[in-house]
Amino acid sequence: MGTAAGLIVTAPVPWRMWLAHPFAGTLLDFGENPDPVRLRLPPVRPLSMMARLGRTIFFYQGLSGSGRRSCASCHSPAHAYGPPDAGPVMMGGPHLRSPGARAVPSLMYLERQPAFSVGPDNEENETVTLAQLVRRGLAAPRPVKTAHDRAATALALVPQGGLFWDGRADTLQAQTMGPLLNPVEMDNGSVAQAAARLARAPFAPVMRTLFGPHIFADPTQAVAEAMFAVARYEIEDPSFHPFSSRFDAWLQGKARLTPAEMRGYLLFNDPAKGDCAACHLDRPTPDGRPPLFTDHQYEALGVPRNPALAANRDPHWYDLGLCGPFRTDLKKDTRYCGMFLTPTLRNVATRHAFFHNGIYHSLRQVLDFYDFRDTNPGRIYPRAADGRVLKFNDLPARYRGNVDRVDPPFNRHLGQKPALTKSERQDIIAFLKTLTDRPFEPRRLCRAPNS
Ligand code: HEC
Ligand code: HEC
């Protein structure tokens, strides 16, 4: 055995094994990645004509009922294409006074989001052969999500993929029709009205060039092409997937983490501690693509009801995610009620509203939720007049069985010691901050990689 430095250059060692190594402490102090990887990053190319048109439309406010909303108003480029302020939801509609019912997600890192499906729980959610799985399983135990093992079959069928918190759109193009027509978002009223606004827009000539002189004769086609262009922008523009965070640099052996960040990373992965990586996958895929910090699957976490949401003034209204009300095709599949898409954690530290209903406004609150939901629910949920803690108060009682009580840290009980201490929660937050991308500089496009 050599020194810690020797360890770094020898064959890749799964993190659990090197943790057990006598020099692990030294490695931790160095903050280096003992097993650097070569990441396959998306190519950086000039935008196509189509994507350039899409960029114009993305920032164009004339495409809204109010004349003051564009995609960028809610998905702000300066805020990781997420909401620009701390409100739980954004205002839209004709006078920008109609509140949405859900937090605005970031639009970054969606280009690898698979279409919605209900299928086998693939360990990495990537196409991996069984042989590869076995080999990797032998080499490196990683936290494996257990919630779905309740099903009797070895290959439990789990909902995965899709866009929106409930996966109701499959492609970025299909998705854009939603906000365009949604009365509390861009509020175009009808496809015909949206098409008329496109026909009056300064970029209408570009649309005629790209899609033919008669494009505006068919309103549905005109809107579909415009939304295709927006989707191309989201897919092609490097600002949606820069992979420029310190964690990406660390993965490639080009940066060190501070001791707090390093501890946070290990807690994030440790099934006896945060176990976050069981759902927010943090390892590169077998073919070297950077991790997206989501398994693209759905979970019911039972986050508290958000009294700040206008929709919640009606005590009988519930946002049940996969089984409605915005999504309608799975209404009868009540075992999915309360399930929401696991979001990416990339750039999560730039957000000010967390979870599908925007209930929390700081990562500290989010970490408290994970740690105390079961061990001390009185810290998380409101109380009834008689003092009872109203646990899982954002779900009707009949669906509370859907909430994940199996995956750590949710496998604990009332009064048990929480999985994480205060300083451990702080360490995890320090780690989450390493997932923030560098501010995007378009000039980097024209420079040689090393200049
Ligand atoms: C008024 C605010 C608002 C505007 C304007 C808006 N969005 Fe959104 N967007 C949202 C909200 C809220 C959601 C989540 C809705 C849900 O899950 O039901 C969302 C979700 C999305 C998603 C899915 C993201 C994911 O992680 O699944 C995409 C993609 C998207 N919007 C793109 C667009 C585009 C393109 C435009 C312009 C045509 C646009 N949005 C305009 C608020 C807005
Ligand atoms: C069993 C799967 C699972 C585990 C384990 C898990 N998460 Fe999550 N995480 C989710 C899901 C699902 C959501 C969205 C839930 C919702 O909005 O109702 C979420 C949301 C979040 C959010 C909010 C992101 C946003 O954009 O609003 C943060 C932050 C987060 N998780 C961090 C963590 C950390 C830190 C841990 C470990 C302590 C962890 N998660 C463990 C599934 C999981």
Image (cartoon, rainbow, N blue to C red):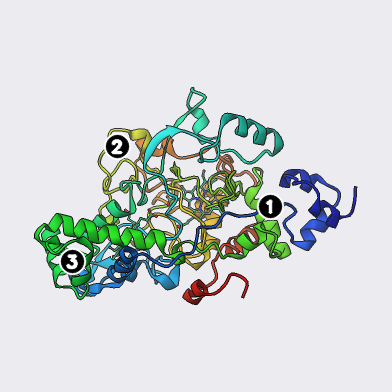
Whether label 1 lies within 8 Å of ligand 2 gets the answer no
Q: Which residue lies furthest to the top in this view?
A: 152
Give the residue pinned by disc 3. Answer: 208
- At label 3, counting other C-alpha atoms closer than 10 Å, the crowd grade (few under 14, some 14-19, many 20 or more) is some
Q: Which amino acid does label 2 sit on?
A: Leu
The local secondary structure at tag 1 comes to helix
Asked if labels 1 and 2 touch by Cβ distance under 8 angstroms, the answer is no
Give the residue pinned by disc 1. Answer: 266
What is the x, y in percent for residue 178? 25, 55
Residue 224 in view here: yes
Left or right, 104 with respect to 352, comes to: left
Give the CA distance from mark 1 to mark 3: 54 Å
Query: Who comes first in sequence, dot 2 or dot 1?
Result: 1
Give the residue pinned by disc 2. Answer: 330
Give the CA distance from mark 3 to mark 2: 39 Å
Which residue appears at 37% of the width and 48% of the height?
394
